[in-house]
C-alpha cells in the first residue's frame, strides 16, 4: 500500500530495492510456465515470501548505515524463497536470478533487467508513478526477461500442446480388447504387439558373459557389462510376457486384467506401458521411439560382448549410468593405488567425430545432448542456441579421473547431466534427484550465471 511504500527514511534505496524485489518475485513465478527449463520442480512461491522479504528489507535498511547486500541476499534467497526449494540446481538458479536485483546496479536509474529496453529500474518517484510504469509494460513478455533464450517459447508451446493432447486422450472412449483382433482398437494393438515381439532378441546369456568377461580386480568394466545384461534381461522378460498376454487377452484366451488393460490402453495411445516402466530405465519417448531406443541399447551391449569394450562408450545406452562411471573410477584408483573417494572428474571436449584408440586413463563418451545452449566447435566453448534449435548434439567427451589438485583451470560452467528432459526425479539418499547423473565442467567465456538462468543442461536422451 502507499503508506508502507512511502514511510521509510532511506526512500531512494527502499523504493529501488522494493521494485527489484517485486520484479524478482514475478520472474520466479513466471519461470514455472517454461517447465524444466524454468525450474526442475515447479515451486509454489507465493505472496507470503514476498511480504516477509519486504519487511526484512525495510528493517535492514532502517537499522544499517550501509546496505547489507550479503545478509539480504541470504535471507531472501536461501531462507524465504529458498526454503521451498529442494533441488540444488534450482537453488543455484534462484540465487543467480536474485543477484540481478539485489545488487548495486539497481540503484542506478535505467538499470536494465533484460535486453529489451522496456524493462528497467525506473527513477525514484511516487507510488502512482511506479504503478503507471508497470501498466505501461507489454502484456506479453519475451523469454529473455526470465533469463531464457528465445527458443524457450517453443519449448513452452510444445509442453502446453502435449498437456492439451494428453487431456484430450483421457476423454476418448475406451473399448478395451472387445471385438478381438477384428475390432478396431484390438486389431491395432495386436498388430503393434506382434511387431514389437518380432524385433525382440533373445535374453542375454549371463553365464556365457561371466566366462568371457570374468570378475577381475584390474578390470571393473567386466562387472559393468554383466550387471547391465542382468538388468536388461529383467526388462525383456516383462516386455515379452506382457505383449504375449495382451495378444491372448485380445483373442479372449485369458482374462483382461486391470494391469493388462492399462498396458493395452497405453499401447493404443502410443505410450510406454506403465508395466514396463516398473522395470525400465527412465524414458519420456513415445512407444515406437522407446522400442527403437531399446533395440539400439541391446545392440550396443551385444557388440560389446562380441567385440570387446568400445573405444567410445555410448553413455546414454547404460541402464544404470552410475555403475559405469564408478567402474571407470575404480579402474583408475586401482591402477595408481589411490583412494577412490579422493578422485574427481575432469572433462575435455574432443574435436574429432570418432576415435580408434582408448585414452591412457578415463574413457571417451558420446550420445549426449545440450539443451539451453549450443556448442562452438571452433572455439570449443558454449554459445547461444541457434534459432529454433532446441537440442544440440554434444561432441565426444574425454572423462578423466583426477585428484582435486589436478582439475583443469579456466572459466567453466558446471552443467548438470540428466537422464531425461524432465530433469526432476525422486530425491535419493545422496541429496540429488534420481534423474541426475553428474555435474559436467564445460568451458565458457561468459559468466556461469548466464547459463544457469538459461537452464543449460546436458541430457542423455531426447523425448522423441
Image (cartoon, rainbow, N blue to C red):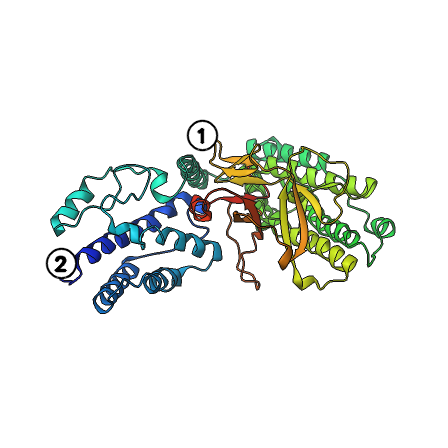
Question: Compared to 289, does 282 lie above or below?
Answer: below
Give the quadrant of residue 218.
Answer: bottom right
Image position, residue 436 (x, y; %): 56, 52
| 30 lies left or right of 196 | left
Give the quadrant of residue 158.
Answer: top left
Image position, residue 434 (x, y; %): 57, 55
| 360 lies left or right of 174 | right
Sequence-wise, the earlier of marks 2 and 1 is: 2
Image position, residue 344 (x, y; %): 64, 57
Judge by depth and name the residue closer to the eye, 58 or 305: 58
Q: Nearer the viewer, mark 2 or mark 1?
A: 2
Could you tell me if residue 253 is visible in this image? no
**What residue appears at the point 45 percent right and 46 percent down from the top-left corner?**
447
Gap in Å between the C-alphas at discs 2 and 1?
Answer: 45 Å
Q: Residues within 10 Å of mark 1 (few under 14, many from 20)?
A: few
User: Could you say which disc has been placed on residue 104 in the image?
Assistant: none
Q: Secondary structure at mark 1?
A: loop
**What residue appears at the point 46 percent right and 36 percent down from the top-left corner?**
384
The residue that mark 1 highlights is 387
Q: Secondary structure at mark 2?
A: helix
User: Could you say which disc has been placed on residue 6 in the image?
Assistant: 2
Q: How many marks?
A: 2
Q: Residues within 10 Å of mark 2 (few under 14, many from 20)?
A: some
- Name the image quarter holding the N terminus: bottom left
**What residue appears at the point 69 percent right and 37 percent down from the top-left corner?**
296
- Name the image quarter holding the C terminus: top right
| 90 lies left or right of 435 | left
Amino acid at each position: 500500500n502507499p503508506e508502507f511504500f512511502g514511510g521509510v527514511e532511506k526512500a531512494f534505496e527502499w523504493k529501488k530495492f522494493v521494485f527489484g524485489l517485486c520484479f524478482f518475485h514475478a520472474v520466479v513465478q513466471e519461470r514455472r510456465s517454461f517447465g524444466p527449463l524454468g525450474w526442475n520442480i515447479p515451486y509454489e512461491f507465493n505472496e507470503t515470501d514476498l511480504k516477509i522479504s519486504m519487511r526484512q528489507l525495510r528493517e535492514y535498511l532502517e537499522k544499517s548505515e550501509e546496505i547489507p547486500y550479503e545478509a539480504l541476499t541470504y535471507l531472501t534467497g536461501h531462507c524465504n524463497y529458498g526454503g521451498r526449494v529442494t533441488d540444488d540446481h534450482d537453488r543455484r538458479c534462484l540465487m543467480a536470478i536474485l543477484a540481478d536485483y539485489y545488487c548495486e546496479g539497481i540503484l542506478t536509474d535505467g538499470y536494465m533487467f533484460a535486453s529489451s529496453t522496456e524493462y528497467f529500474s525506473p527513477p525514484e518517484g511516487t507510488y502512482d508513478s511506479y504503478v503507471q510504469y508497470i501498466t505501461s509494460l507489454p502484456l506479453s513478455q519475451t523469454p529473455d526477461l526470465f533469463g531464457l533464450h528465445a527458443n524457450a517459447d517453443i519449448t513452452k508451446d510444445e509442453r502446453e500442446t502435449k498437456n492439451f493432447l494428453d487431456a484430450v486422450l483421457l476423454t476418448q472412449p475406451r473399448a478395451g480388447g472387445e471385438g478381438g483382433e477384428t475390432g478396431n482398437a484390438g486389431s491395432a494393438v495386436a498388430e503393434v504387439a506382434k511387431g514389437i515381439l518380432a524385433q525382440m532378441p533373445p535374453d542375454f546369456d549371463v553365464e556365457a558373459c561371466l566366462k568371457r568377461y570374468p570378475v577381475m580386480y584390474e578390470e571393473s568394466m567386466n562387472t559393468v557389462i554383466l550387471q547391465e545384461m542382468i538388468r536388461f534381461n529383467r526388462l525383456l522378460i516383462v516386455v515379452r510376457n506382457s505383449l504375449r498376454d495382451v495378444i491372448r487377452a485380445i483373442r479372449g484366451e485369458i482374462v483382461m486384467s486391470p494391469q493388462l488393460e492399462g498396458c493395452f490402453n497405453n499401447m493404443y495411445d502410443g505410450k510406454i506401458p506403465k508395466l514396463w516402466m516398473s522395470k525400465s530405465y527412465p524414458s519420456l519417448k513415445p512407444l515406437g521411439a522407446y522400442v527403437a531406443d531399446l533395440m539400439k541399447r541391446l545392440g550396443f551391449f551385444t557388440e560389446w560382448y562380441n567385440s570387446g569394450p568400445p573405444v567410445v562408450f555410448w553413455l546414454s545406452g547404460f541402464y544404470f549410468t552410475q555403475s559405469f562411471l564408478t567402474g571407470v573410477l575404480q579402474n583408475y584408483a586401482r591402477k595408481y593405488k589411490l583412494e577412490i573417494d579422493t578422485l574427481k572428474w575432469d572433462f575435455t571436449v574432443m574435436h574429432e567425430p570418432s576415435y580408434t584408440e582408448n585414452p591412457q586413463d578415463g574413457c571417451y563418451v558420446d550420445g549426449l545432448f545440450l539443451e539451453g545452449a549450443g556448442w562452438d566447435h571452433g572455439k570449443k566453448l558454449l554459445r547461444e542456441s541457434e534459432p529454433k534449435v532446441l537440442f544440440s548434439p554434444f561432441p565426444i567427451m574425454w572423462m578423466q579421473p583426477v585428484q582435486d589438485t589436478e582439475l583443469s583451470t579456466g572459466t567453466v560452467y558446471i552443467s548438470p547431466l540428466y537422464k531425461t528432459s524432465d530433469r526432476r526425479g525422486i530425491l535419493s539418499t545422496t541429496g540429488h534427484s534420481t534423474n541426475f547423473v553428474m555435474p559436467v565442467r564445460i568451458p565458457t567465456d561468459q559468466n556461469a550465471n548466464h547459463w544457469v538462468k538459461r537452464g543449460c543442461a546436458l541430457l542423455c536422451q531426447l523425448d522423441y
